[in-house]
């Protein structure tokens, strides 16, 4: 159900965040296997002054938050997804390996799930290896 809020002369519609739903899909699908999650950082570049840079690693020319499946839980993954989601850019890759990747093609070749944002950041569209097509999360 959509929540509408009246503020001043405007009617505002609250937009939900489906990060928790995406985290649940990842854990439900891959719970019994070892995997790594790569979430691309959309803003930062080398030389920027941010504490977040300490959490990130390079894969090719891009910075990623890398999360090992045995070092996180569903709630922490949902928080990381929210942290790195902006309306115009989000990329998450679940890879079957835990070795560091040197470039993007190596990362994508080991991908078992790729998720991008959809609907101006309101939801996610994802592809799973060995599935018939892309899936979108519904609210």
Image (cartoon, rainbow, N blue to C red):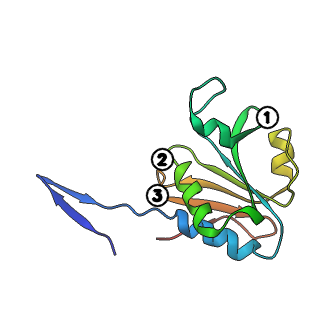
Q: Is residue 123 left or right of residue 70?
A: left
Image position, residue 65 (x, y; %): 68, 47
**Horizontal relation, residue 70 to residue 49: left or right:** right
Q: CA distance from mark 1 to mark 3?
A: 28 Å
Q: Quadrant of residue 51?
A: top right
**Location of residue 46 in the rendering, given as x and y in whole percent from the top left corner:** 66, 26
**Residue extending furthest toward the top:** 47
Tell me if 122 is positioned left or right of 112 in this view: left
User: Disc 1 on helix, strand or loop?
Assistant: loop
At 69% from the left edge and 41% from the top edge, which residue is drawn? 56
- Find disc 1 in the rendering and name its residue: 60
- Taking the spot 34% from the left edge, 75% from the top edge, the residue there is 1
Q: Label 3, secondary structure: give it.
A: loop
- Looking at the image, which is closer to me, 77 or 107? 77
- Mark 1 surroundings: few (<14), some (14-19) or many (≥20) residues within 10 A: some
Q: Which residue is mark 3?
A: 122
Q: Residues within 10 Å of mark 3 (few under 14, many from 20)?
A: some
Determine which residue is flagged by label 2: 87
Q: Which residue occupies 73% across, 62% down? A: 71
């Amino acid at each position: 159900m959509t929540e509408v809020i009246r503020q001043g002369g405007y009617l505002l519609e609250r937009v939900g965040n489906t990060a928790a739903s995406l985290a649940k899909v990842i854990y439900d699908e891959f719970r019994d296997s070892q995997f790594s999650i790569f979430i691309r950082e959309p803003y930062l570049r080398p030389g920027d002054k941010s504490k977040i840079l300490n959490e990130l690693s390079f894969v090719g020319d891009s910075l990623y938050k890398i999360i090992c499946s045995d070092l996180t839980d569903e709630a922490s993954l949902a928080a990381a997804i929210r942290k790195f989601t902006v309306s115009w850019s989000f990329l998450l890759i679940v890879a079957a390996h835990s070795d560091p990747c040197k470039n993007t093609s190596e990362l994508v070749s080991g991908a078992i799930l790729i998720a991008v944002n959809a609907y101006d950041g309101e939801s996610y569209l994802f592809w799973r290896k060995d599935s018939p097509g892309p899936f979108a999360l519904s609210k």
